[in-house]
Image (spheres, grey):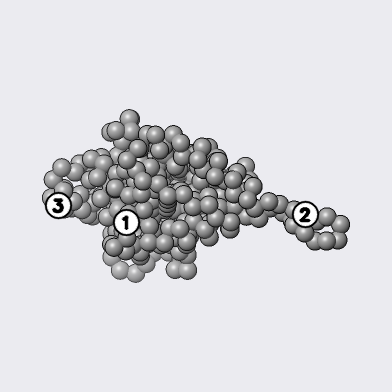
Amino acid sequence: MSSQTAPIVVGYDGSPAGTAALDWATAEAVRENAPLRIAEVFEIVVIDRPSPGKVVPLAALRTVRERGLEALAAALQLKYPGLHVDTVLLEGAAASSLIDESANARMLVLGTRGMGGFTGMIVGSVAVQAGAHAHCPVVVVPPDTIRSLHQPRRVVVGVDGSKLSAKAIDFAFGQAETIGARVVAVHAWNSPFSTYQGTAGDVLFNYAQLEKVAEVLVAESLAGPRQDHPDTEVDVELVLGQPARVLLHAAEAADLLVVGSRGHGGFTGLLLGSTSQQVLHHAHCPVAIVR
């Protein structure tokens, strides 16, 4: 399936976060003139003893869920006549079912935490697993998105020179062009390990030199996307600090924060790096994880 015909798939479960994800995915599908596919996971829970009261047949439950999805799709098509919407009721574990569905999607949109999540968790395991394993970019939408209508639209992207960062930059420029936003490219680095000469205790590194290296890295990373999107305005922020914290600060009231699933410095076996995990758990704007 080509990227032009591939749908935007949204995981929906009726929760506040799921509803926020559906709203975001619908708006994105309308902007991109893309098909929208609403996916609900019909997860069967087995208990060791029957509950009191009437037992509802499994087929009847499935029919109710399917009709609910059909009604939801009909309402969206009535509101957006040009929008193509279809629905699918998946069976199995939520994360693996949605990851399989992502194989033919241009992007997978999820809420931060659905009906089955633990109350204390900000981001549920489904969003984390999908961010690590999905076959397409994953956008995770919080129910409490904070954005000022008086501020210019912004798409913030983390830049670290890695291959996945390059994919994230391409995605960020595409999103910025779609919504008429400016790109804010953020590169953050921690201080080098301290080295000492004798007992003087002087840290031997040159901040100006490090900043120059960062400028070159970001300029090279943005050169291609800037050429491909000449009308997109770009701001560059070079900040000494912990990357996740710097990105979260830059993305306050942003339209979207985009990161690679794992950047430089991550352990090879980790599919989702510490920076992407941290921004996923703490951002108050939608977060796109690009692999």
* N-terminal label among 2 and 3: 3
Classify mark 2: helix, strand or loop. loop
Instruction: Name the quarter where the N terminus is drawn.
Output: top left
Cα gap from disc 1 to disc 3, whole angstroms: 27 Å
Give the secondary structure at mark 1. loop
Q: Which mark is residue 152?
A: 1
* Position of residue 122 in the picture relative to residue 208 (left or right): left
Location of residue 147 with respect to 24 vertically, above or below: below
Residue 7 located left or right of residue 259? left
Query: Which amino acid lies under the numbered mark 2 shown in the image of this protein?
Result: Thr
Q: Position of residue 25 (x, y in %)?
A: 29, 50
Whether pointer 1 and pointer 3 mark residues with C-beta atoms closer than 8 Å, the reply is no
Up-down relation of residue 22 to residue 161 (above or below): below
Q: Residue at x 24, y 45 (%)?
A: 31
Q: Callout 1, which amino acid?
A: Pro
Image depth: mark 1 or mark 3 in front? 1
Q: Which residue is mark 2?
A: 195
Q: Nearer the viewer, mark 2 or mark 3?
A: 2
Identified at 47% across, 68% down, the residue is 120
Disc 2/disc 1 C-alpha distance (Å): 43 Å
* Mark 1 closeness class: few <14, some 14–19, many ≥20 residues within 10 Å: few
> On the image, numbered disc 3 is attached to which residue?
79
Residue 139 x, y percent position in the rendering: 39, 50
Kind of residue at badge 3: Lys
Q: Is residue 91 visible?
A: no
Earlier-in-chain disc, 2 versus 1: 1
Query: In 3D space, how far apart are the residues under numbered discs 2 and 3 (Cα atoms)?
Result: 63 Å
